[in-house]
Amino acid sequence: MTDKTRRSLVAALGAAPFVVPLLAKAQTLDTPSKFKVIDSRERIRQRYFPNLVLTTQEGKKVKFYDDLVKDKIVVFNMFYAKCEGICSPVTRNLVRVQNLLGDRVGKDIFFYSFSLKPKEDTVPALKHYAEMHKVKPGWLFLTGSADDMELLRRKLGFVDPDPEVDKDTSNHIGVLKYGNEPLQRWGGCPGMQAPDAIAEAISWVDWPKDSANMKANGGAK
Amino acid sequence: MAYISKRNRTKEKDRQTAARNRGELIAAGFKRRDLLKMGLLTSAGLLIPQKGLSAHPITSAGMVFDDPQSPPTTPFVENMPRLTILAPVASLAPAPTQVPQAGEGRTEPHQAFVQFPPQRYYEMSQQQGTVSMAPAGELPPQTIWGFNGITPGPLIVERYGVLGSPGNGSILVRQRNNLPSNNGGFGFPSVTTHLHNGHTPLESDGFPCFFFGQNKFYDYHYPNVYAGVNSTHPGTGDIKEAMHTLWYHDHRIDHTAENTYKGLAGAYILFNEFDTGDENTGFRLPSFGDGQNPLTSFDIYMVFNDKVFDEDTGLLRFDLFNTDGILGDKFLVNGKINPVLHVSPRRYRFRWLNTGPSRFYQMFVLGPNNTTKSFWQISTDGNLLERPVQVNSSRFSVAERVDVIVDFTGQAGKTFYLENRLEQEDGRGPTGNVLGAGQGNKILKIVVDGPAVLDNSIDPATIPANTTYFYGFPNTNDQERITRTFRFERGNGQWQVNGQLVGGCNQAPRFRIKRNTVEKWVFQNNSGGWQHPIHMHFEEFQTLTINGNPPSSTGLITRGRKDVFRLEHNMEAKVYFRFRDFIGKIPLHCHNVVHEDHAMMVLGQIDDVGDNNTQP
């Protein structure tokens, strides 16, 4: 057990999350009023998109939800700059996807690559990696505190249920997650899939053709 | 324990420790300092019981971050609904056409429309609905997407044509996409409806890439003919290829899990002159009646699925970023959490279907004082065995079906439960451990308090052993044209088949089957951690060997015609396929729908050329 999970465990115990419903069963009245009414888009934000402060390859500080995800079509993946495995092939593949999507990237579609090794992925290392792969605007390489990056990785589902497999960072690099935040449409696909297939999958979460103003109006609400 | 890796044995030890700790925890009265003590003593003490025996889900967000648990509900209060039966319509507007027409999402003409003209029309609207899944006041009304706005969708009850006159069972089902743009958090309003596992011309099969958008319709032509009708058994088909318990569900590529979880799944049964639905004729299986009246309907379809509800809002919750598989902590039967079924003291046919998303079941009938009641398994995946086989349990993964006969004769006044005793901790599949009687998940309560009614159904105990009571199996001796191997694995967190990724809808087919030929396929799983329900559309297979041994006719039955192969830990199996009659595009995929949506799929086609790719 790592120190981190132990700390988290203690924190979880403090809240005793799994005991509460068992106790509550005998004590609370089973009425619908015990439930909160929360907009589903807001619930997704609460559940998956902590508003962490991250740092880009340009050294700029950004807030994960407010600045990167809100009102956008986004593509997420994981990498680290010194990766000798499939990071580079996935990044090169995504460059082709970026080219296929054209000037939409940076306008309403954004690519985000999150560091799996934030301690060694300094701003210059990120910048070097981005330049080496000739990525275009609209694609950020992001780092942050080790705890924040670990939280983000878990929130976005770049995990393996086997703790031993999960420790091997190479098991988090092959997958892309993508989605349309206001429309609440999300999906995932392999990072090494054919670029046109990835671009097609992203197109499925695009704004509906007959609702050009949907984004301006804040989505599908 | 045969297939459990060393790592999983360690895990099993942890689990047992955890179970002990949990016992201590309960004895300690849930005091916080005890929890802390337990938690600090052992990691397994807290983590594993959360998602182990009590079936709590694991999330993409990991174990200690945001582990969801459904609000409490009171089990065994509400009655188990019988499925609503869909009535045919007199006509469709616009009238169906062989070639796709304006407003239709179909892109290919019906290949058997002239040969098997539809005799009856059905129409369904895929739309949002509001349903109650728990006793009054315990959960808010749930917004679902359903066929006709209900989940499970309506039951289609049809018949094969009388032998010698094919076409009489031919139907056309018009599906309309009336789903809303606002999905309420999950759901993808673009659909394709798969009839699992009809012998259906492939343009009507619900191929994952044949999806259609909102406000469009798609005409599905189901001739309901036996395989062989245009080949080995011209004009009639092979009666040994009869199928009886089917289902239909959304199959939208990359988005099947959220759409089926949100409700887009329904049931479909076929009768004929042998499996008649009347216990006085044919095989004399318990009567279907009108499917509703408890005094005359003894053939009951049960759709199982597991779900999790948001602890704050009480609403159905789908884990958007999970790639491993999703487990629920609430078990539903026909749309209700832990319902009750009242039966009479006689024999019943239950048709069990698991719609997932990711859980495997091993179902027992639990009797008073933790006794286990045996029953008769009569089919695998809706295909009748050679004869009823007495078993203590049936195992079925996602999309598998099992038809059983449970005899409640002489049991008046007693209470039973359908109990799942297969331990599963996460989306990877079951651990391999089967829990003790009363230690599993009680899913359905069955009370034998109905009136005594006449039972003219066959008593399976009177059928002599080693006889063929049903159709018997088609032969598996014809020479194969090719043997192909499909190796299912995981690399860099991505699913792969034979080391390749699915290529998307625009790729060339990875394999081409020549129509009216035999193929043998080898399925391989080299993992000790993952299990996969492998599904092939359109044709059933028969298993030749599992890890070199013949399939089993008793216990956990693996001999028989199936359309889902349960590929367990470190398993290699060889199966026998005969592809007949129709052509078109076809997928082979994992039916853990979360794996399926993350590209655990190979797209191929049946045509009149074929290829020689032994490792597609």
Image (spheres, coloured by chain):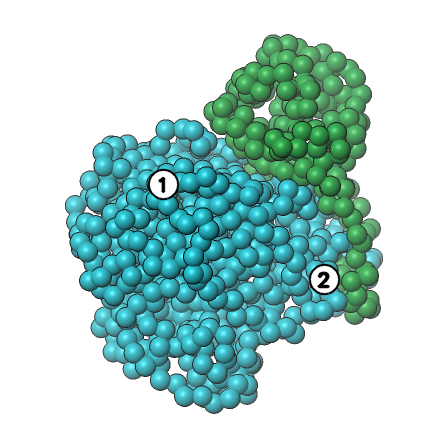
Q: Tag 2, which chain?
A: B
Specify the amino acid type for callout 2: Leu
> Which chain shows up in green?
A
Classify mark 1: helix, strand or loop: loop
Q: Secondary structure at mark 2?
A: loop
The colour assigned to chain B within the rendered structure: cyan
Q: Is residue B20 above or below residue B218?
A: below
B29 is higher (above) or lower (below) than B293 = above
Q: Is residue B400 visible?
A: no
Tally of numbered discs: 2
Q: Residue sitting at 43 percent across and 57 percent down? A: B91
> Where in the figure is residue A67, as x and y percent of width and height?
77, 26
Residue shown at 50% from the left, 78% from the top: B293
How far from the left and from the top, in percent, is residue B170? 33, 57
Which of the two discs, 2 and 1, sits closer to the camera?
A: 1
Residue B195 to residue B388: above or below:
above
